[in-house]
Image (cartoon, rainbow, N blue to C red):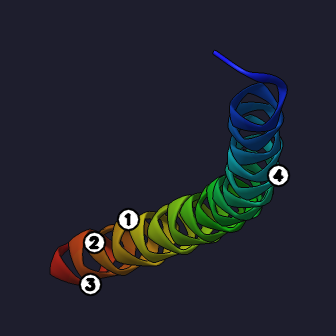
C-alpha cells in the first residue's frame, strides 16, 4: 500500500469517526429525551392512580 492509499484510508477512518461521534451524540440526546418523557408519563400515571383511588374511597363512603 502506498502513501496516498494509506492517507486516503486514514482520512476515511477520520470521517467515519466524526460521523459516528455525531450519531452517538444524537442518540444520547434522544435517550435523554425518552428518559424525561418516561419520567413524565410515570408521574402522570401515579397522579391518575391517586385520583382513581380517591374517587373509589368517596364512592365507598357514599354507600355507607
Q: In the rendered view, does 15 fall on the left or right side of 16?
A: right
Q: Which residue is mark 3?
A: 62
* Viewport quadrant of the N terminus: top right
Density class for disc 1 (Cα within 10 Å; few <14, some 14-19, many ≥20) is few
Please tell me which of labels 3 and 4 falls first in the chain. 4
Q: Position of residue 36 (x, y in %)?
A: 71, 63
| Mark 1 → mark 3, Cα distance in angstroms | 14 Å
- Residue at the extreme front: 2
Element type where label 2 sits in the image: helix
Q: Which residue is mark 4?
A: 18
| Mark 2 → mark 1, Cα distance in angstroms | 5 Å
**On screen, residue 4 above or below 41:** above
Please tell me which of labels 4 and 1 falls first in the chain. 4
| Mark 2 → mark 3, Cα distance in angstroms | 10 Å
Q: Position of residue 53 (x, y in %)?
A: 38, 65
Q: Which residue is mark 2?
A: 56
Q: Are the residues tagged 2 and 1 within 8 Å (C-beta)?
A: yes
**On screen, residue 6 above or below 56:** above
Q: Nearer the viewer, residue 64 or 32?
A: 32
* Viewport quadrant of the C terminus: bottom left
**On screen, residue 14 above or below 2:** below
Density class for disc 2 (Cα within 10 Å; few <14, some 14-19, many ≥20) is few
Q: Which residue is mark 1?
A: 53
Q: Nearer the viewer, residue 34 or 58?
A: 34
Q: Nearer the viewer, residue 11 or 38?
A: 11
Q: In the rendered view, does 36 fall on the left or right side of 42?
A: right
| Mark 4 → mark 2, Cα distance in angstroms | 57 Å
Please tell me which of labels 1 and 3 falls first in the chain. 1
Amino acid at each position: 500500500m502506498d502513501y496516498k492509499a494509506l492517507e486516503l484510508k486514514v482520512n476515511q477512518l477520520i470521517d467515519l469517526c466524526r460521523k459516528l461521534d455525531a450519531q452517538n451524540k444524537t442518540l444520547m440526546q434522544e435517550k435523554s429525551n425518552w428518559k424525561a418523557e418516561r419520567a413524565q408519563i410515570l408521574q402522570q400515571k401515579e397522579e391518575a392512580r391517586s385520583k382513581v383511588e380517591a374517587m373509589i374511597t368517596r364512592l365507598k363512603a357514599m354507600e355507607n
